[in-house]
């Protein structure tokens, strides 16, 4: 077979609104509003620069079923550029942009194929010979509860390589709506070579070969839980049919968490310096992209007393935002104060007073298996109870909460001056 190269992208969410941040900072809000458009442009540039043979997009091209006209026109423009470069595109729709959503009458340029609600095969050819065959299916409506993999057919077509293009939730990923649920086994049982999936926004290779099962993740992070690099996969298929995938970043604004430890910091101005240093590092790491940072202050130290004062964290946040530079900027979205007072719990637990006795009692519980089991059953009930039906917390979780409760007790019983 002929070796070839294609790009696998998904979850473009073009024209995501980023509503909350617009109210906070107009400049940041506008930049974010443009970010999904720019990441999409980067995707098209990449396909053209690398002269790939074709592009597959596994759903959620638009953010809303009522796709904005602007998003549709910009998407069409991208498809046009691809078409002019002689690169074909194969597209399915997902739960964010199902077929029954509002759609302008758009004429797709030559070489663009949008799959409908029934699976069908399309063959990609190069120099008059089949390169690969692609089967895809689009979400007819938002809430697809059916396992769509069952509808994919064994290839009848004479093709050396086959690709399944689908928006779905493999293995009941609870971070995402359980639309088009299926299992990894369902996908393994098909006679396809590569499952180009969409829906899960964090990049994941569920299987490398026979078949490869891959989520490329979304192309632009949209909130703190979509931190780090975002992009697509460049897939090379060798003459022997071996698959090699390479991640390519496409995002233009990056979401990053950061932590600053107050343990060795004595004054507020030194804290500000330490934070600034951390933000500079994030800027360097983002290689020219803008960064939205969620900052956590952690550790134990004298500054805790200052930080818990009313309005202190807000003041700090305002100050940090005021010093933000021109693009590329690092903008602090939120400051979480997770600091602790400078209490030495070990020596404190030796004291002959109420707090000392309380801390010793907690230590006894932590050391005693029977007490821990009792605690686990009481706490576990909150999770596994009839209304919640969640899995019981692990022993490690319970130990961590107990340690946390020990700190909270210490703070309550020994308020600082
Ligand atoms: Mn999505």
Image (spheres, rainbow, N blue to C red):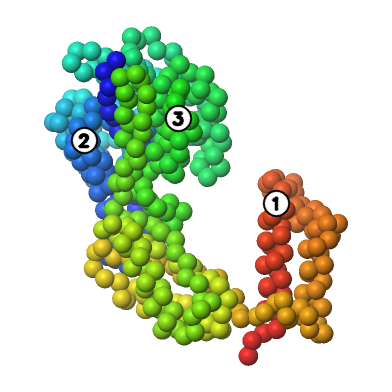
Between 6 and 383, the one lying in front of the other is 6
Give me the C-alpha separation between circle 3 and circle 1: 32 Å
Give me the C-alpha separation between circle 3 and circle 2: 23 Å
Task: Name the front one of labels 2 and 1.
Answer: 2
- Kindly identify which residue carries mark 1: 393
Secondary structure under tag 3 reads loop
Task: Name the front one of labels 3 and 1.
Answer: 3
Q: Which mark is first along the chain, 2 or 3?
A: 2
Q: How many marks?
A: 3
Q: In the image, residue 266 lies at what x, y percent?
A: 49, 84
- Kindly identify which residue carries mark 2: 50
Residue that sits furthest to the right in the current view: 370
Q: In the image, residue 413 lies at what x, y percent?
A: 72, 81
The residue at the point 16 percent across, 27 percent down is 86
Quarter of the image for residue 333 reads bottom left
Secondary structure under tag 2 reads loop
Give the class, few, some or many, for how many residues have Cα within 10 Å of label 1's Cα (few <14, many ≥20). Answer: some
């Amino acid at each position: 077979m002929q070796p070839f190269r294609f790009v696998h992208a998904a979850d473009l969410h073009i024209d995501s609104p980023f509503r909350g941040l617009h109210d906070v900072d107009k400049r940041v809000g506008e930049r974010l509003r443009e970010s999904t458009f720019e990441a999409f442009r980067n995707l098209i540039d990449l396909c053209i620069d690398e002269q790939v043979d074709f592009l597959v997009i596994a759903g959620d091209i638009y953010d809303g079923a009522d796709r904005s006209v602007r998003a549709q026109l910009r998407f069409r423009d991208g498809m046009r550029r691809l078409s002019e470069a002689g690169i074909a595109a194969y597209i399915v729709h997902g739960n964010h942009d199902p077929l029954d959503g509002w759609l302008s009458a758009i004429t797709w340029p030559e070489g663009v194929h949008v799959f409908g609600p029934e699976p069908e095969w399309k063959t990609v050819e190069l120099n008059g010979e089949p390169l690969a065959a692609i089967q895809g299916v689009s979400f007819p409506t938002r809430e697809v509860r059916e396992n769509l993999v069952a509808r994919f057919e064994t290839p009848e077509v004479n093709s050396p390589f086959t690709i399944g293009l689908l928006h779905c939730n493999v293995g009941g990923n609870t971070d995402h709506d359980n639309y088009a649920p299926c299992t990894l086994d369902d996908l393994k049982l098909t006679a396809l070579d590569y499952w180009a999936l969409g829906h899960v926004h964090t990049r994941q290779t569920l299987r490398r070969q026979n078949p490869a099962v891959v989520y490329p993740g979304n192309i632009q992070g949209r909130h703190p839980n979509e931190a780090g690099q975002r992009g697509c996969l460049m897939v090379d298929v060798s003459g022997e049919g071996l698959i090699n995938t390479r991640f390519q970043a496409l995002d233009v604004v990056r979401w990053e968490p950061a932590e600053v430890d107050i343990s060795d910091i004595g004054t507020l101005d030194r804290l500000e310096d330490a934070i600034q240093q951390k933000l500079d590092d994030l800027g360097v790491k983002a290689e020219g992209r803008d960064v939205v940072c969620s900052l956590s202050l952690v550790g134990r130290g004298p500054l805790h007393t200052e930080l818990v004062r009313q309005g202190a964290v807000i003041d700090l946040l305002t100050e940090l935002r005021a010093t933000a530079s021109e693009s590329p900027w690092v903008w602090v979205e939120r400051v979480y104060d997770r600091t602790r007072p400078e209490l030495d719990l070990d020596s404190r637990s030796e004291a002959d007073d109420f707090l000392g006795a309380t801390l010793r009692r907690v230590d006894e519980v932590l050391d005693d298996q029977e007490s821990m089991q009792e605690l686990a059953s009481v706490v576990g009930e909150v999770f596994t109870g009839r209304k919640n039906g969640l899995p019981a917390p692990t022993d490690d979780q319970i130990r961590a909460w107990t340690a946390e409760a020990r700190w909270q007790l210490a703070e309550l019983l020994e308020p600082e001056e």
